[in-house]
């Protein structure tokens, strides 16, 4: 990198910092809003950081006034190093009482504080960007034993943190209490916590898919995992108006859209595939595709993706389209990351599951992952063949990482025929009850519906 660039002072605007602090001293009523917009480390000058902290602290303490008298007094009682009694007092390090008075005079108009906040935030973001890029540059030059994919993932995470403002997760208990009551009020208002699946029994058990959680939808082959996931995606994107990303590692985007059209339009999937729709089905298919076109559903059909590539695509979709949920079809097709050390398939799946769990928490959206159930359930015999958590294929880490696990279990009559009945078994829910919900699978339309008493 050009030495002339590296030798330059980091981006900052001293006048805007002074004007913002002066505005806070002039008008204490703006302090709560400013504190929500700007943090101490957004200020470039050390003196400004400490004066901002003093103003914020005085305002937090039962609304004490923060002015040219109380702020210097507060700073004169504090030391640069609180643990060292010989450390200089903060008032000396910020320029004395006179500098605080100068800040009071530095604000042209307190009414312009929002503009000052924006300038300070923008400069802080640019400094963070320089820091992130420098860190990535260092990682790239010192990449001994670290894959390029890992370095890229770290770089993208750094950039996402800058944009999202989520670098620090530490908050005071009082702030968390306020946030908690706000969330509870919102839940009470809408009658749910998270994104609704469209199936009444499942939503009653789970209260919807919640931000930051990792959910697994698992079943044996050909039970209907993808169809069930597409039924949920269709409801969420159209009925709930939720922006979401469906990642298909197995089927093309045309195949996915074809199945969604059949689900939404109640169209015979066999005739749709053969292009022999009846006039009424054509009408319903066109209406279904119109609804899908107006939804905020996004489909990614890139095959052979690693978990790092998937994470990058979800982050981009979160930034570009504001997605609030992601569905991945399916876990077994996620390519393992290449490492020098030899790893077992179980270790690869465990690492993938853990990364997905961290990703859900990082960007604060639900991630639903489809997974296979092994054959052990079938070996237990007809009376005991319902899937259990121990039947999750390839890794016990899935059970450990998951916040929610839902199994699909197709019911078969004594003659071995398919009744179309499927149990959705909520086998694990970290923050709620478990239970079983009966569904009816209409294979002709690839559609799942709630199995109510009228069907019996």
Image (cartoon, helix red, strand yellow):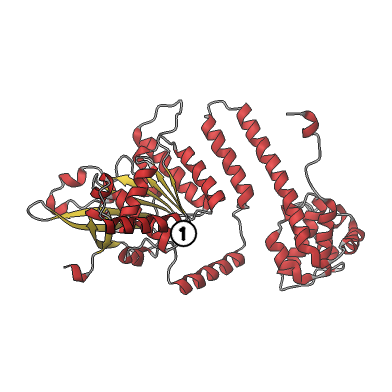
Q: Quadrant of residue 376?
A: top left
Mark 1 element type = loop
Is residue 186 found left or right of 433 in the rendered image?
A: right
View extreme (front): residue: 279
- Residue 353 visible in image: yes
Work out whether residue 246 or residue 388 is closer to the camera in this orientation and state it.
246
Q: Quadrant of the N terminus?
A: top right
Q: Is residue 179 left or right of residue 107?
A: left
Q: Is residue 312 above or below residue 277?
A: above
Residue bearing the label numbered 1? 242
The picture places residue 301, in percent across and down from the top left corner, at 41, 41
Residue 185: x and y, percent?
51, 73
Badge 1 crowding class, 10 Å Cα cut-off, few under 14, some 14 to 19, many 20 or more, is many
Task: In this rendered view, identify the residue nearer to me: 399 or 446.
Answer: 446
Q: Quadrant of the C terminus?
A: bottom left
At 28% from the left and 53% from the top, the residue drawn is 407
Q: In this picture, is 10 found above or below 291? A: above
For the point 70% across and 48% down, the residue is 125
Please name the residue shown 31% across and 61% down the image: 434
Confirm whether residue 167 shows in the render.
Answer: no
354 or 247: nearer the viewer: 247
Question: Residue 380 location, x and y as percent?
Answer: 15, 47
Residue drawn 24% across the image and 46% down it? 220
């Amino acid at each position: 990198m050009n030495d002339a660039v590296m030798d330059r002072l980091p981006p900052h605007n001293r006048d805007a910092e002074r004007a913002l602090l002066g505005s806070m001293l002039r008008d204490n009523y703006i302090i709560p809003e400013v504190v929500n917009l700007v943090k101490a480390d957004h200020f470039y000058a050390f003196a400004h950081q400490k004066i901002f902290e003093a103003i914020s602290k005085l305002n937090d303490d039962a609304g004490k006034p923060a002015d040219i008298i109380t702020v210097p007094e507060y700073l004169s009682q504090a030391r640069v190093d609180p643990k060292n009694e010989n450390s200089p007092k903060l008032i000396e390090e910020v320029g004395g009482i006179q500098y605080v008075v100068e800040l009071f005079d530095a604000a042209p108009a307190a009414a312009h504080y929002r503009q000052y906040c924006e300038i300070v935030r923008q400069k802080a973001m640019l400094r963070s960007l320089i820091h992130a890029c420098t860190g990535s540059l260092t990682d790239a030059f010192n990449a001994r034993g670290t894959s390029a994919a890992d370095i890229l993932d770290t770089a993208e995470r750094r950039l996402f943190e800058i944009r999202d403002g989520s670098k620090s997760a530490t908050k005071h208990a009082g702030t968390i209490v306020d946030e908690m009551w706000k969330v509870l009020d919102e839940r009470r208002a809408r009658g749910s916590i998270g994104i609704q699946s469209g199936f009444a029994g499942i939503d009653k058990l789970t209260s919807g898919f919640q931000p930051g959680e990792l959910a697994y939808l698992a079943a044996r082959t050909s039970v209907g995992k993808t169809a069930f996931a597409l039924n949920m995606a269709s409801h969420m994107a159209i009925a709930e108006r939720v922006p979401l990303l469906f990642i298909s590692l197995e089927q093309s985007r045309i195949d996915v859209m074809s199945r969604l059209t059949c689900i939404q339009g109640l169209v015979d999937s066999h005739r749709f595939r053969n292009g022999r729709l009846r006039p009424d089905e054509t009408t319903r298919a066109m209406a279904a595709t119109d609804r899908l076109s107006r939804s905020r559903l996004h489909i990614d059909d890139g095959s052979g993706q690693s978990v790092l590539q998937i994470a990058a695509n979800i982050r981009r979709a979160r930034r570009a389209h504001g997605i609030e949920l992601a569905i991945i079809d399916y876990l077994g097709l996620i390519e393992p990351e290449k490492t020098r050390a030899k790893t077992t398939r179980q270790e690869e799946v465990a690492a993938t599951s853990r990364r997905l769990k961290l990703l859900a928490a990082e960007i604060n959206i639900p991630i639903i992952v489809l997974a296979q159930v092994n054959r052990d359930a079938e070996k237990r015999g007809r009376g005991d063949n319902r899937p259990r958590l121990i039947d999750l294929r390839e890794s016990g880490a899935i059970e450990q990482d998951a916040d929610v696990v839902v199994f699909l279990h197709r019911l078969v009559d004594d003659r071995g025929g398919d009744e179309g009945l499927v149990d959705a078994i909520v086998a694990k829910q970290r923050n709620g009850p478990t239970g079983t919900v009966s569904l009816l699978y209409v294979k002709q339309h690839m559609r799942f519906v709630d199995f109510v008493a009228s069907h019996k």
